[in-house]
Image (spheres, grey):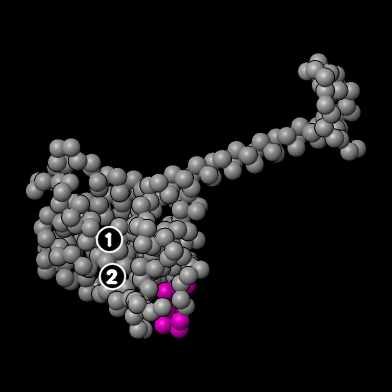
Amino acid sequence: MSLSPIPWASFADAIEWWKALPAEDRERLDREHQERRRRDDERQRRQYRVERARRLSHVAEKFADRTFATFERSTENEAALKLALLVADDASAGAWFYGGEGTGKTHLAAAIAHAYIERGVACPMTSVVRLHDDLKAAYDAHGETRRGREDLIASLVSMDSLILDDIDKPVPTPHFTERMYRLVNDRYEAKRPIIVTSNYAPSEIAIAWEKAGGKRGRTTIDRLIEMCRRPGEPAARFAKLTGESRRGVA
């Protein structure tokens, strides 16, 4: 039976029309109504999640167009692209992209962030050089939050995922190392992943951080490395990008 909207003269007329319908038509209309409500509710929830993720993620305007669609694929970066797509689809573990300048590490990290945001996953992407300065401004020598400053670490720990771009750029001073240890360890304990980019390999950075920051520095990098390993996978999610720099190439 095909039912079309009827311009009822009153609410009472609508009630009488409904009562006159066969039971199977009332049941079908009720099912259709419930399904429309379910789809509308899910659409609104998804829109809220995406808007919240976009608001919280703070991906720099410079990286607004760094998506998988605009990534320039090559034989040198094929494995890294494959890993990035895997991570974008499965946020249960982090990943580490490393290699020379201009090889696409940050592009892939930004592409992951954009993919997360479209799924409603909050994923701030921050330059560790900038994070170094922000941590110094936010915390005193004892690690206490300065007056009038936000507890930046707590905010970053609360995010669904986190991208640390160029982790090997700042010098790991004692103050910076302590704050980074808290950030990494708190996310480690909360089982919230971190995605990392660097020029040097993770093992090389671990040695450098141990020399500069002692045991705490080494532990910080070791935790990051462990967070790049998904339970059940034999190897950590590392990808080295090689080839010529693409910076400045039209």
The reply, left or right, for residue 40 in relation to residue 195 is right
**Can residue 194 be seen at all in this image of the molecule?**
no
Q: Quadrant of residue 63?
A: bottom left
Q: Which residue is mark 2?
A: 198
At x 36%, y 71%, the residue is 105
Q: Which one is earlier in the sequence, the residue at label 2 or at label 1?
A: 1
Left or right of residue 176: residue 160: right
Q: Is residue 28 left or right of residue 141?
A: right
Is any part of residue 190 visible from this angle? Answer: yes
Q: Secondary structure at mark 2?
A: strand
Kindly give the residue lying farthest to the top in the view shown. 12
Residue 51 in picture, x, y percent from top left: 47, 45
* x then y, percent, for residue 9: 82, 19
Residue for point 86% across, 35% down: 3
Estimate the spatial distance between the alpha carbons at disc 2 and disc 1, rounded to whole Å: 11 Å
Q: In the rendered image, which residue does mark 1 sit on?
A: 127
Q: Position of residue 80 (x, y in %)?
A: 42, 74
Does residue 148 show up magenta in the picture? no
Q: Which mark is residue 208?
A: none
Q: Identity of the amino acid at label 1?
A: Ser
Q: Which quadrant is the C terminus positioned in?
A: bottom left
Q: Residue at x 70, y 35 (%)?
A: 34
Mark 2 residue crowding within 10 angstroms, few (<14) / some (14–19) / many (20+): many
**Eye-nearest disc, 2 or 1:** 1
Quick one: 206 or 197, which is closer to the camera? 197
- The percent coordinates of residue 224 (x first, y second) are 29, 62
Magenta part of the chain: 74-82
182 versus 97 height, above or below: above
> Residue shown at 19%/57% (left/top)?
132
